[in-house]
């Protein structure tokens, strides 16, 4: 009985302070035009060379200029034209120099891939 009384008191305290609400009061309402927009993501840019490509996984490995490491990049599937990005990845060739705008989301996810002049 004591545990249920403590639990009830905790639930009342949470509702009173507003900590149990699932929605943030500043978030746009579900179905509003602002909620349909692409979420803002933190991005970074890398310039380097494509070192390998995996068409089945729609991924490629990339060596940044000035780095000895190669990292795998895949398409970013949220709020962008995914079909176009998959087509760009499909057309990459090993040795291509590219500028990649990416985000860190379960690994590096390419948002934009641009051609860069050779060194």
Image: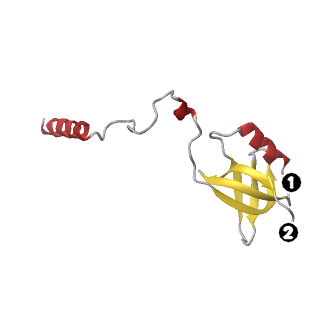
Give x and y (percent) for residue 39.
56, 42
Q: Report which residue position mark 2 lands on.
A: 119
Q: Is residue 111 left or right of residue 95?
A: left
Q: Residue furthest top?
A: 31
**Residue in view at x 45 percent, y 30 percent:** 29
Q: How is this picture coloured?
A: secondary structure
Residue visible at 75% across and 62% down?
A: 47
Label placed on residue 50: none
Q: Position of residue 25 (x, y in %)?
A: 38, 37
- Location of the C terminus by quadrant is bottom right
- 14 vs 6, nearest the viewer: 14
Q: In the rendered image, which quarter is residue 62 located in?
A: bottom right
Kindly indicate the quadrant of the structure image that contains residue 86: top right
Dot 2 or dot 1, earlier in sequence: 1
Q: In front: 88, or 52?
A: 88
Circle nearer the viewer, 2 or 1: 2
Task: Say which quarter of the image contains residue 2.
Answer: top left
SS label for mark 2: loop
């Amino acid at each position: 009985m004591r545990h249920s009384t403590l639990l009830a008191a905790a639930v009342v305290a949470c509702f009173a302070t507003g900590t149990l609400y699932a929605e943030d009061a500043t978030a746009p309402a579900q179905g509003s035009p602002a909620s349909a927009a692409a979420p803002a993501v933190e991005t970074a840019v890398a310039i380097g060379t494509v070192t390998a490509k995996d068409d089945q996984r729609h991924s490629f490995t990339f060596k940044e200029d000035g780095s000895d490491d190669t990292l795998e990049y895949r398409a970013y599937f949220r709020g962008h034209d995914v079909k176009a990005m998959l087509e760009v990845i499909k057309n990459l060739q090993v040795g291509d120099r590219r500028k990649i705008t990416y985000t860190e989301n379960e690994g590096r996810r390419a948002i934009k891939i641009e051609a860069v002049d050779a060194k």
